[in-house]
Amino acid sequence: MLSNTAMSIIDKCSIFRQKCVLCAATDATNGLCAPCRRSLPRLPDEQCPRCAEPVAGGALCGHCQRSLPAFDALHVPYIFGYPLSGLIHAFKYGKRLQLAGALGGLLSEFAACQALKYDYVIPVPLAKERLAERGFNQSHELARAIAVTMRSPFSAQLCWRKCNTLPQASLGRAERLKNVRHAFGVKRRCDGLSIAIVDDVATSGATLSALAETLKKQGAKRVDAWVLARAFSPKT
Ligand SMILES: [Zn+2]
Ligand SMILES: [Zn+2]
């Protein structure tokens, strides 16, 4: 039997107990307790097989019927809504890097259910200026986490972002596509490779589609996008 003093030391020790990043409960796994995890807004199961837009019956959505994105599938577990949106925001702009574990854990749990493997798992790169301003690439940790889960090689070096494009949030769907169309570069040929590209949030999917298109021009056979949350823009 451990003494009360020893027990109270263990109770306070973060190795034994992890605090929930949302409610500070002390029985968290990967930084989130079970009730908070259940409160995260899940995407409905019936969704477009290509871009994950919620569609009754799981048919191809209107946007994809008009123009297919260059990625083959978008894998995304959550809707970009409360309280997940707050966590992603705090991670990205508040530089709360300790949230990387919780957010990476959420995407990893989802990846573990799909049993997919890739030749490369890569983060959507940030332009040099944006990286300098933010200090880190929020997609990097997410990509690394799922690469481990999927037992697939991680690479942050394969692609780069050429120019600092306008923030996508200020643009409508058509402008978003134009804005990022030629934003990415790939360092070498990717003939026959299957690649997972990873980001924190997708709205129209224009950024992911532009990167997928660039990789396919370099010979990639399959490009899947993996994101933590799907946002729905009022501008369509
Ligand atoms: Zn909690
Ligand atoms: Zn679609």
Image (cartoon, helix red, strand yellow):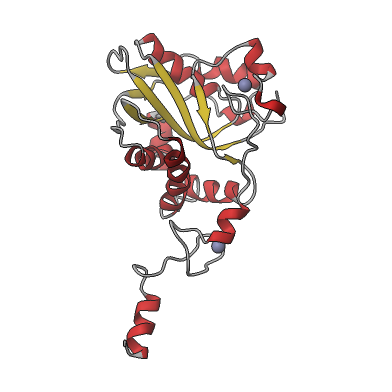
Is 172 drawn above or below residue 34 in the view shown?
above
Ligand 1 resides in the quarter of the picture at bottom right
Q: Is residue 138 left or right of residue 39?
A: left
Q: Residue at x 39, y 36 (%)?
A: 131
Viewer-nearest residue: 126 or 50: 50
| Number of numbered discs overlaid on the protein picture | 0
The image position of residue 175, as x and y in percent, is 62, 18
Where is residue 171? Give x, y as percent.
63, 24
Q: Quadrant of the N terminus?
A: bottom left
Q: Is residue 49 left or right of residue 152?
A: right
Q: Position of residue 186 (x, y in %)?
A: 33, 17
Q: In the picture, which quadrant includes the C terminus?
A: top right
Comparing 131 with 189, the one in front is 189
Left or right: 66, with 105 as reference point: right
Relative vertical location of residue 227 with respect to residue 164 in this rendering, above or below: below
Along the line of sight, the residue nearer the viewer: 12 or 187:
12
Q: Nearer the viewer, residue 231 or 27?
A: 27
Residue at image coords 42%, 65%: 18
| Placement of 138 over or under 193, stated as above or below | below
When asked about the image quadrant of residue 52, the answer is: top right
| Residue beneath the point at 43% across and 46% down | 104
Tell me where residue 100 appears, x and y as whole percent: 42, 49
Residue at image x 42%, y 28%?
Answer: 197
